Image (tube, helix red, strand yellow):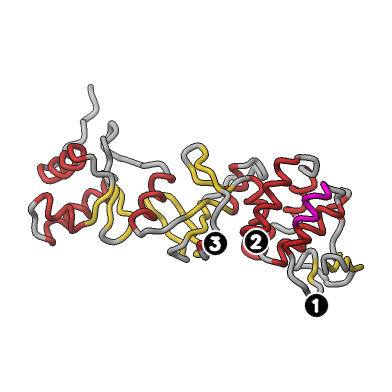
């Protein structure tokens, strides 16, 4: 006995046909209302019904993602990158993936996160779109960069996400773990170049000071260390290498760092 195929109502069929014939990937409720020649209340009921059935995706109130073709079974789950691209294109924003999901993408951790974390220029909030949990962290446009569209995802480069782990240490809880990631790659010149470039272009002075001190302690390429030194403005106070720990320890006057946790250096 064959399983029953999904049955679409006439309005559902009209909307899907319109989107497919016109090549419409994303539309507002107002655009759909006009295209189908419906009144607003009728269109909203249609869109709510199709969203509940998984026939389209509500990106946010009044904004919808439409399938080029519904899969067998009639339920559509677009890839996360498609959801994010359309959301931010519609709002003239920019974004890139960072944090736990990016750490896992680059093989820095084996833990699979249940949330995709993104830096972006529009929103600071947690949300769920079509089953995709998203933590949105709003940043200035200058904080974005050094990301690539890898495997359909816009993820920060390896050096960039390690720099993010130092920059956003309180949010991600990634110190001194990030120092271990650097130690494991201390002879990888491509990684070091990426890390230093990320710190100079998209980090702040404390990040550059901490990373510079770590690279010096690891005996890394002098050119990379010199570039970081040159980028650091004058400072008067010392900052701890690992902010969550005691501030007691010897000091590195070159970088203005309190060496309060160095166990990662050797083991």
For the residues labelled 3 and 1, say whether their Cβ atoms are less than 8 Å apart.
no
For the residues labelled 2 and 1, say whether their Cβ atoms are less than 8 Å apart.
no
* Residue that numbered label 2 is attached to: 203
The one of 233 and 35 positioned closer to us in this rendering: 233
For the residues labelled 3 and 2, say whether their Cβ atoms are less than 8 Å apart.
no
Dot 3 surroundings within 10 Å: few (below 14), some, or many (20 or more)?
Answer: few
Residue displayed at 53% across by 55% down? 117
Q: Secondary structure at mark 2?
A: loop
For marks 2 and 1, give the CA distance.
Answer: 19 Å
Q: Earlier in the sequence, mark 2 or mark 1?
A: 2
For marks 3 and 1, give the CA distance.
Answer: 26 Å
* Residue that numbered label 3 is attached to: 142
- Residue 89: x and y, percent? 36, 53
Q: Earlier in the sequence, mark 3 or mark 2?
A: 3
* Residue that numbered label 1 is attached to: 236
Q: Residue furthest right?
A: 250
Q: Is residue 247 magenta?
A: no
Q: Is residue 225 magenta?
A: yes
Which secondary structure dominates the residues rendered in magenta?
A: helix
Q: Is residue 14 left or right of residue 251?
A: left
The one of 176 and 257 positioned closer to us in this rendering: 257
Dot 2 surroundings within 10 Å: few (below 14), some, or many (20 or more)?
Answer: many
- Residue 166: x and y, percent? 69, 59
- Residue 179: x and y, percent? 77, 53
Magenta-drawn segment: 221-227
């Amino acid at each position: 006995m064959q399983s029953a195929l999904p049955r679409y109502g006439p309005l559902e069929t009209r909307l899907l046909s319109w989107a497919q014939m016109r090549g419409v990937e994303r539309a507002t409720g107002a655009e759909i209302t006009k295209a189908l020649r419906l009144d607003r209340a009728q269109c909203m009921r249609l869109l709510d019904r199709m969203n509940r059935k998984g026939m389209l995706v509500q990106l946010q109130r009044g904004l919808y993602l439409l399938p080029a073709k519904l899969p067998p079974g009639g339920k559509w789950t677009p890839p996360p990158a498609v959801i994010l691209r359309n959301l931010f294109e519609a709002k003239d924003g920019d974004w890139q993936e960072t944090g736990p999901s990016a750490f896992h993408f680059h093989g820095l951790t084996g833990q699979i996160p249940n949330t995709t974390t993104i830096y972006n220029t529009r929103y600071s909030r947690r949300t769920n779109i079509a089953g995709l949990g998203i933590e949105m962290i709003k940043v200035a446009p200058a904080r974005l960069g050094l990301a690539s569209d890898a495997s359909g995802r816009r993820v920060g480069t390896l050096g960039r996400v390690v720099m993010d782990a130092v920059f956003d240490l309180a949010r991600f809880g990634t110190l001194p773990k990030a120092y271990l990631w650097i130690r494991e790659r201390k002879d990888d010149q491509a990684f070091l170049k990426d890390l230093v470039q990320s710190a100079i272009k998209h980090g702040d002075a404390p990040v550059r000071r901490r990373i510079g001190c770590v690279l010096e302690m690891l005996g890394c390429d002098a050119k990379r260390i010199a570039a970081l030194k040159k980028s650091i403005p004058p400072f008067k106070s010392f900052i701890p290498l690992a902010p969550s720990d005691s501030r007691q320890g010897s000091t590195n006057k070159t970088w203005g760092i309190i060496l309060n946790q160095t166990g990662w250096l050797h083991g």
